[in-house]
Image (tube, rainbow, N blue to C red):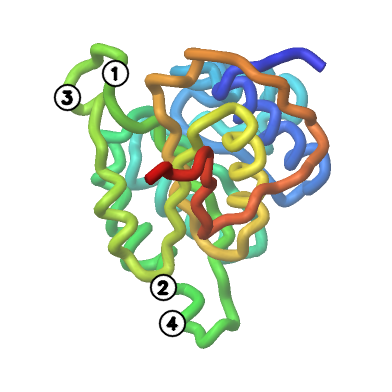
């Protein structure tokens, strides 16, 4: 088993779910032909076709609305925001619709969507490409927010996010996309959401 980077673990998780679940699809700006600005979706369109890996217009509002609509109709869309600072036009669809489907319909409808957001600074990019806006989402009832810290966690948490019946904001730390590698078995094993991982115990 080869060691892979965090960004490669994301690609691996997307490919695994698309292979095993026909309702999973990927959409966003340049995610198909170009494989995304960070190449997280590289090769997926060639493998799964352009009906499941959709290049969208450069319009975040449309991406968000399309994602919510697909999720409400039985699909499991995974949308990519090119950079964290581009997420603001999406907030109305995410906060006013995606996060409220379950309570608004008393559980009759859910919104199984994932919004992948390259997150944070550390790559010497302009201001709209280097934001840390996770607090906006963690304060919204009905949304789960995930922020992986290693390739193995990126793989397992993305699987869990895609399988979750409710919307998940999946924030990917750009600074460590390719910082180091570790072995990540492509075994389809998801990690639990809503928990913190203890890396070491504190000493007194």
Identify the residue shown where x is 28% and y is 62%. Answer: 139
Q: Nearer the viewer, mark 4 or mark 3?
A: 3
Q: Is residue 9 above or below residue 108?
A: above
- The dot on residue 127 is 3
Q: Nearer the viewer, mark 3 or mark 2?
A: 3
Residue marked by disc 1: 122
Identify the residue shown where x is 79% and y is 41%. Answer: 188
Q: Of the residues under marks 1 and 2, which one precedes in the sequence?
A: 2
Q: CA distance from mark 3 to mark 1?
A: 11 Å
- The dot on residue 101 is none
Residue marked by disc 2: 100
**What x and y, as percent, mark residue 125?**
24, 15
Marks 2/4 in contact by CB < 8 Å: the verdict is yes
Q: Nearer the viewer, mark 1 or mark 4?
A: 1
Q: Of the residues under marks 4 and 3, which one precedes in the sequence?
A: 4
**Side of 189 relative to 177 (left or right):** right
Picture quadrant where residue 138 is located: bottom left
**What x and y, as percent, mark residue 135?**
26, 51
**What x and y, as percent, mark residue 128?**
21, 28
Of the 4 image quadrants, the one containing the N terminus is top right
Q: Of the residues under marks 3 and 1, which one precedes in the sequence?
A: 1
């Amino acid at each position: 088993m080869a060691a892979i980077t965090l960004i490669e673990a994301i690609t691996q998780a997307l490919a695994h779910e698309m292979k095993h679940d026909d309702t999973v699809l990927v959409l966003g700006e340049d995610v198909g032909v170009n494989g995304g600005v960070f190449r997280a979706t590289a090769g997926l369109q060639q493998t799964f076709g352009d009906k499941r890996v959709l290049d969208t217009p450069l319009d975040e509002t449309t991406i968000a609305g399309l994602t919510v609509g697909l999720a409400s109709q039985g699909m499991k869309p995974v949308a990519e925001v090119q950079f964290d600072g581009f997420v603001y036009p999406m907030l109305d669809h995410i906060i006013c619709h995606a996060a409220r489907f379950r309570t608004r319909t008393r559980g009759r409808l859910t919104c199984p969507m994932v919004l992948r957001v390259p997150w944070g600074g550390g790559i010497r990019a302009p201001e709209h490409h280097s934001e840390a806006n996770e607090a906006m989402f963690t304060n919204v009832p009905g949304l789960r927010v995930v922020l992986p810290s290693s390739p193995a966690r990126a793989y397992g948490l993305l699987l869990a996010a895609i399988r979750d019946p409710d919307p998940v904001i999946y924030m990917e730390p750009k600074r460590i996309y390719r910082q180091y590698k570790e072995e990540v078995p492509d075994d389809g094993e998801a990690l639990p959401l809503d928990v913190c991982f203890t890396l070491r115990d504190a000493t007194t």
